[in-house]
Amino acid sequence: MNSTDATTFWDDLYATRPAATDAPSANARLAETVDGVQPGTALDLGCGAGGDALFLARRGWRVTAVDVSAVATGRLADLAQRLGLGDRIRTATHDLGETFPDGSFDLVSAQYLHTPLPLDRDAVLRAAAGALRPGGLLLVVDHGSIAPWSWNQDPDTHFPAPAEIAAGLDLDPAGWTVERADAPRRIATGPDGSTAEVVDHVLTIRRTA
């Protein structure tokens, strides 16, 4: 499927949802990872409605928030301005399979960067690792289970373990170090307000050189 198809798919998806009037909740694994960390520059890959970008900006980070959907990035830019965070959030529209944002960052966050469309995720995450400054952290959080409200209800779905994802990136251990690779559980709340226990696959990689 080509870039236009991906753009149309995600634009249509976000257009069917009401625009947020306040900051959506941040992802739990991002919040726990940056707790107590000195703010710097962050790249939010697949920013969606912008909860993570706004969370980081409110804590002093300067955030580049990217998504394939111009509907999503446009809404986030407008919301950031209304919340007084426009000077801390820069939005950009990228099909990450084709282009990657410029710059170097102290944190690159890829939260549930899943798509039903073709995407070379390993290549995207390698580019993300390469965008880290020395000492910077790549945080990859993936689904490790199927929630009742997930669009994917295939019981045979394979969720790659964090160690598998790290292996696929094939990063030189002289320059990057895996600091966390585990599968914690948490209680999540779905769009309809229902709750369920879910598994997250969490991978953190530090650029050491």
Image (tube, rainbow, N blue to C red):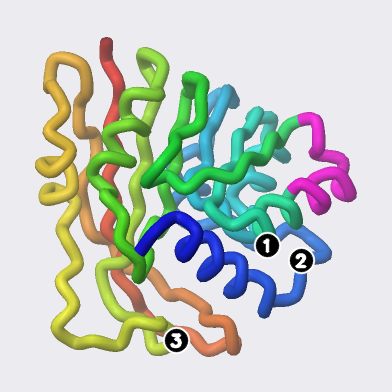
Please identify, in this view, whether the residue under mark 2 or under mark 1 is nearer the observer. Answer: 2
What kind of residue is marked 2? Ala
121 to the left or right of 24: left
What kind of residue is marked 1? Pro
106 to the left or right of 77: left
Query: Residue at (52%, 78%) from the top-left corner?
Result: 189
Q: Is residue 178 magenta?
A: no
How many residues crowd around disc 1 within 10 Å: few (fewer than 14), some, or many (20 or more)? some
Q: Are marks 2 and 3 in contact (CB under 8 Å)?
A: no
* Cα–Cα gap, marks 2 and 1: 7 Å
Query: Which residue, given by chain and number where applicable, does mark 3 sit on?
Result: 149
Secondary structure category for the residue under label 2: loop
Q: Which mark is residue 20?
A: 2
Residue 60 image offset from top left, x and y in percent: 69, 30
* Cα–Cα gap, marks 2 and 3: 20 Å
Secondary structure category for the residue under label 3: loop
What kind of residue is marked 3? Trp
62 or 29, which is in the foreground? 62
Quarter of the image with the N terminus in it: bottom left
Q: Are marks 2 and 1 in contact (CB under 8 Å)?
A: yes
Query: Which residue, given by chain and number where applicable, does mark 1 sit on?
Result: 24
Tell which residue pokes out farthest to the top in this image.
209
Query: Residue at (31%, 55%) from the top-left corner?
Result: 119
Q: Is residue 84 magenta?
A: yes
Magenta range is: 77-87
Residue 7 image offset from top left, x and y in percent: 53, 60
Query: Residue at (83%, 65%) from the top-left corner?
Result: 21
204 to the left or right of 60: left
* Cα–Cα gap, marks 1 and 3: 18 Å
